[in-house]
Image: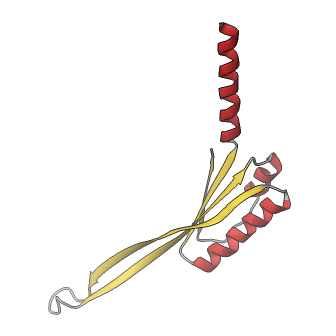
Amino acid sequence: MTAVKTKKQNKKKEAKKEEASKLRIRVRAYESKILDSSVKQIVDIALRYDANLLGPIPLPTEIKKYTVNRASFVYKNAREQFEMRVHKRLIDILSPSPKIIEALTNLNLPAGVDIEVKML
């Protein structure tokens, strides 16, 4: 009985390891051109090492709107509106090799690009 249970447990652990070998990269920036160029660098590195790649997947743009009074006293109804747009992309690398991870850590991205890497 215990041998059967251990075989089932080993199969479950192996299945989890196979599922867990995924690298999820989320890239965010205020300017879409800079974002696309940095995503292209990441994709080029992944393709150079023959990785299975999903993406880049464009995620919804996050828009933050701010309304500010133009004058503080007399012209109370005069207002200005400003907005900040945050563009986002998602890249999944399936079964990444250590060479890919090392190349991604040595990657130089332009200022204003935020990158978040998770192992799933």
Residue occupying image coordinates x 42% and y 73%: 63
- Left or right: where 59 falls relative to 53: left
Image coordinates for residue 27, horizontal then vertical, percent: 60, 64
Q: Nearer the viewer, residue 52 or 37?
A: 52
- Please give left or right for residue 87 compared with residue 101 in the image: left
How many numbered marks are there?
A: 0
Q: Which residue is at the far left?
A: 74
Quadrant in the rendering for residue 46: bottom right
| Vertical position of residue 83 compared to residue 13: above or below | below
Q: Nearer the viewer, residue 56 or 35?
A: 56
Q: Quadrant of residue 7?
A: top right
Q: Which is nearer the eye, 35 or 75? A: 35
Residue ID at (15%, 88%): 73
Q: Residue at x 70, y 43 (%)?
A: 21
12 above or below 97?
above
x and y percentages locating residue 114 in the rendered image? 58, 64
Q: Which of 90/83 is in front?
A: 90
Query: Which residue is found at the position 66% from the left and 20% from the top?
Result: 8
Dividing the picture into quarters, in which one does residue 12 lie? top right
What color scheme is it?
secondary structure
Left/right placement of residue 35 relative to residue 83 reads right
Outermost residue, top side: 1
Q: Position of residue 55 (x, y in %)?
A: 66, 63
The quarter in which the N terminus is drawn is top right
Left of 17 or right of it: where is 71?
Answer: left
Q: Can you say whether 18 is above or below 86 in the image?
A: above
